[in-house]
Image (cartoon, rainbow, N blue to C red):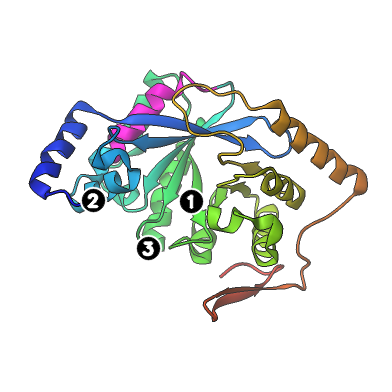
Amino acid sequence: MIIRDEEVYPFFQKIIKQKLLNIVFQPIVSLETGELFANEALTRGPQNSFFSSPLNLFNYAEKTGHLYTLEKITRELAIERSNQISENNSKLFININARVIEDPCFTPGNTISFLKRNGISPTDIVFEITERSAITDFDKFTSVLEHYRSQGFLIAIDDAGAGYSSLQAISELEPDFIKIDRSLITNINNNRIKASLVEAFTYFANKSDTKIIAEGIETKEELDFLVNLGVNYGQGYYIARPKTEKQEISQNIKQSCIILRQKQVIEGRQHFVQPTDIIVVKKNHTIFGTYRADLPLI
């Protein structure tokens, strides 16, 4: 769909000025109990427009130098509207572009003030770092993240296993949560390589006090397989689609998680890779890296 820029830019400015954005929330559930753990805030532009796609919306904002402004508006809208869907002790995941978090205008003080006005603690907020572009200065980026952590915010790395979300980003940033990209989750129950990679992530997470979230769960078979792997949390259309209103997690989801985990405890099963196993990260016949499961990721 080709739209002339002189038509697009005025409409984009109108979206920013009037905050014509839809915020939807997708639940993240515990794979131990099936209970709600958090909601991820997702942004949509006006329906039936070029900007209804979040990819178009945020790419255009970055292209025109308005990414910080757009993300600030979406962040504040997500916080305001989360009161309508949140439950006690549930967390709110907010997507933040890696470039924005280094912007000098992005200060935790502003966000904390806004949280206080809405009765939300920083400890209930998880900044989900999306790497649309590679992080080039890890020392600087880590320093910025530590400042936010000192305020109580938690950190998640999005799309692990795809794009720029490298092993280096995980080892350098030491996130509280690692979100496994849906490309590794789709049909995982029938793919030995995907299963081994997610199992390796799970082993690493257990050794480093990090929690794993599987994204893009679309079938019962995928959910059951991930529960058996020991993955901490899950998210996807099979569990719940993004909506503006509060959602109840189905009893089928809860029962499936509880029964499978209880079975694991009774049988004493362990699914993690052994320390002597070698994990090979490979694509199109090119080896990107190998490591032993008992050694730090580099």
Position above or below: 21 against 186: above
On the image, the x and y values in percent for residue 202 come to 68, 55
Question: Can the viewer see residue 221 in this picture?
Answer: yes
The answer to which of marks 2 and 1 sits earlier in the sequence is: 2
Most common SS among magenta residues: helix
Mark 3: which amino acid?
Ala
Q: Is residue 258 left or right of residue 127?
A: right
Report if residue 81 lies within the magenta region.
yes
In the drawing, what numbered circle is on residue 158? 1
- Magenta highlight on residue 198: no
Screen quadrant of the C terminus: bottom right
What's the amino acid at mark 1? Answer: Asp
Q: Give percent across and percent down for residue 60.
A: 23, 49
Mark 1 / mark 3, whichever is N-terminal: 3
User: Callout 2 environment at 10 Å: few (<14), some (14 to 19), or many (20+)?
Assistant: few
Mark 3, Cα crowd under 10 Å, few <14 / some 14-19 / many 20+, is some
| Label 1, label 3: how far apart the Cα atoms are | 13 Å
- Using the image, tell me which numbered label, if any, was put on residue 134: 3
The residue located at (45%, 37%) in the rendering is 151
Gap in angstroms between the C-alphas marked 2 and 3: 28 Å
Question: In the picture provided, is 237 more to the left or to the right than 144?
Answer: right
Where disc 1 sits, the SS reads strand
Residue that protrudes farthest toward the right in the picture? 267
In the image, which residues are magenta? Answer: 71-86
| Residue for badge 2 | 1
* Residue at (73, 50) in percent of width and height: 225
x and y percentages locating residue 235 in the rendered image: 58, 41
Q: Amino acid at mark 2?
A: Met
Q: Are marks 1 and 3 in contact (CB under 8 Å)?
A: no
Q: Secondary structure at mark 3?
A: loop
Residue at 40% over, 61% down: 139
